[in-house]
Image (cartoon, grey):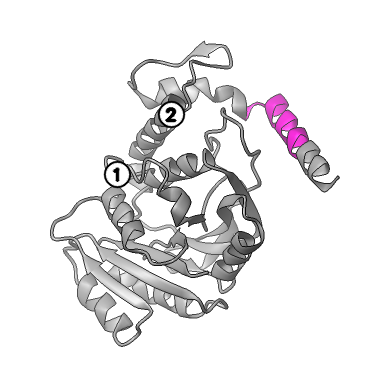
Amino acid sequence: MKFSILVANYNNGHFFDDCYNSIISQTADNWEVIILDDASTDNSVEVIKNKIKGDPRFHFFENEVNRGVGFSKGKLIELANGEICGFLDPDDALLPQAVQASSDIFKNKTDVVLTYSRPMKCDAALNPLHEIRSAMQVLNGDPFFFNCPVQIIHFVGFRKEVYLTCEKMNSTLKIAEDQDLYLKMYEKGNVHFINQTDYLYRAHAGGISQNDNKQKSYEYFAQAIFLAMKRRDLKQINGKNIPDKYTNSKEIFDLLAYQNSIPFRILKKWRLILRKFKARR
């Protein structure tokens, strides 16, 4: 079972050394790397090509013009040869066991369509700051699950053959395209949390969903949630009507505010415990 590590790059060549070194340090050996540069305006192409030169496991492609991250990630999946795919941002890095841990779950659990683990937030130099503890197992098969608050997060692996039965990557989403993907895959089968830290997430000024882009990321995430509501043919959530058309992020997040309440979280935890107990019987 080959794992395709997918890297969508735009002007992040100066971070690629850490990304590259983390890939070649993987304990797994059946992997490939597909890199797509989205018409970078810096020296990314030269840097990346020089780094991967002579290694047949790495495959490099370029967009003729800038198409955005949603388009690029969709193209990467098309180019992938592996049964399992997983995205790695060029400014981030993996810990050595990441690919093997995901691959093992897919080999042993045929009902799992997506795996995810826990990321470590790092500073601009990739020095660890703290684990992102919000990552945890979610309840499968719940039409009212929208990953809000976020629990499915890096490092994510998914079955390509199942992805091909979805609506594919949404090229109109400039941010939160990954959340849109997670929700689509969630609708196709079980997702599995790997209880370990596998991903080093670099916080820096140029991050696509950081700093000045944070409000934009909320808007795009809300759009992804709204699209999931429509795909699932939901009319109401917690007694409130879902709007016919998307207008703004506040309207969507207000519908899901109850999911942040303590009673709801306690109930969700008990439902998970009960489901695990039934599965062991």
- Asked whether residue 268 is drawn in magenta, I would say yes
Residue 231 bears which disc, if any? 2
Position of residue 219 relative to residue 134, above or below, is: above
Label 2: few (<14), some (14–19) or many (≥20) C-alpha neighbours in 10 Å: few
Identify the residue at the far bottom of this view: 54
Q: Which residues are magenta?
A: 260-272
Q: Who comes first in sequence, dot 2 or dot 1?
A: 1
Comparing marks 2 and 1, which lies closer to the viewer? Answer: 2
Q: Position of residue 273 (x, y in %)?
A: 79, 40
Q: The disc labelled 1 sits on which kind of residue?
A: Lys
Q: Position of residue 140 (x, y in %)?
A: 63, 39
The chief SS type of the magenta part is helix
Q: Position of residue 118 (x, y in %)?
A: 59, 56
Q: The disc labelled 2 sits on which kind of residue?
A: Arg
Position of residue 271 relative to residue 102, above or below, is: above
Residue drawn at point x = 66 percent, y = 61 percent: 108
Residue 174 bears which disc, if any? 1
Identify the residue at the far left of this view: 64
- Please say whether residue 267 is visible from this viewpoint: yes
**In the picture provided, is 255 more to the left or to the right than 97?**
left
In the structure shown, which secondary structural element does the residue marked by tag 2 occupy? helix
**Quadrant containing the C terminus in the rendered view:** top right
In the structure shown, which secondary structural element does the residue marked by tag 1 occupy? loop
Task: Specify the quadrant of the image occupied by residue 109.
Answer: bottom right
- Please say whether residue 126 is visible from this viewpoint: no
Label 1: few (<14), some (14–19) or many (≥20) C-alpha neighbours in 10 Å: some
Position of residue 11 relative to residue 135, above or below, is: below
Residue drawn at point x = 58 percent, y = 70 percent: 100
- Asked whether residue 261 is drawn in magenta, I would say yes
Position of residue 279 relative to residue 206, above or below, is: above
Q: Position of residue 102 (x, y in %)?
A: 58, 63
Between residues 247 and 182, which one lies in front from this camera angle?
182
